[in-house]
């Protein structure tokens, strides 16, 4: 019963590509501010230089993967919305 109820629902959220890119730009700006704050704390309050380099590398790799995924998704969506 419950499964058939959800399968018959069709929810569409109209979203223009420009709105999607504005959301992406806001996310990147917040990410950049957070990155500056977190790097400052790691550098000044970290236990060792090796920990700082390791955490910095992991954080930047993860951040680049997430931001690149968002950007690719936004571009693919903008091409499919045309």
Image: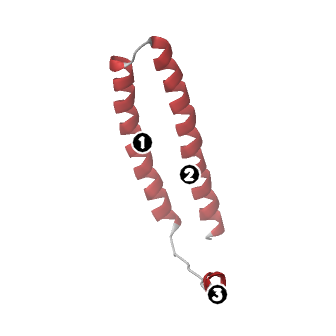
In this picture, is 5 found above or below 34? below
In this picture, is 64 found above or below 9? above
In this picture, is 70 found above or below 6? above
Mark 1 in CB contact with mark 2 (< 8 angstroms): no
How far apart marks 3 and 1 lie (CA) works out to 43 Å
Question: What's the residue at 46%, 64% (across, down)?
Answer: 19
Task: Compare marks 3 and 1 and give the one earlier in the sequence.
Answer: 3
Expressed as whole percent of the image width and height from the top left, the position of residue 73 reads 61, 56
Task: Compare marks 1 and 2 and give the one earlier in the sequence.
Answer: 1
How crowded is the residue under tag 3: few (<14 C-alpha within 10 Å), some, or many (20+)?
few
Disc 2 element: helix
Expressed as whole percent of the image width and height from the top left, the position of residue 41 reads 34, 25
Q: Give the residue at mark 3.
A: 1
Q: Give the residue at mark 1.
A: 31
Disc 3 element: loop
Q: Tell which tag, 3 or 1, sits nearer the viewer.
A: 3
Quarter placement of the C terminus: bottom right
How crowded is the residue under tag 1: few (<14 C-alpha within 10 Å), some, or many (20+)?
some
Question: What's the residue at 40%, 51% (across, down)?
Answer: 26
Residue at the limit of the structure toward the top, as seen here? 49
Disc 1 element: helix
Quarter placement of the N terminus: bottom right
Question: What's the residue at 37%, 38% (across, down)?
Answer: 34
Q: As rendered, which of 78 and 48 lies closer to the eye? A: 48
Q: Which mark is residue 70?
A: 2
């Amino acid at each position: 019963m419950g499964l058939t109820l959800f399968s018959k629902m069709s929810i569409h959220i109209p979203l223009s590509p420009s709105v999607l890119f504005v959301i992406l730009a806001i996310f990147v700006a917040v990410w950049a501010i957070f990155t500056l704050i977190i790097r400052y704390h790691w550098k000044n309050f970290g236990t060792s230089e090796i920990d700082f380099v390791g955490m910095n590398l992991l954080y930047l790799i993860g951040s680049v993967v997430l931001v690149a995924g968002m950007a690719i998704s936004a571009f693919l969506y903008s091409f499919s919305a045309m």
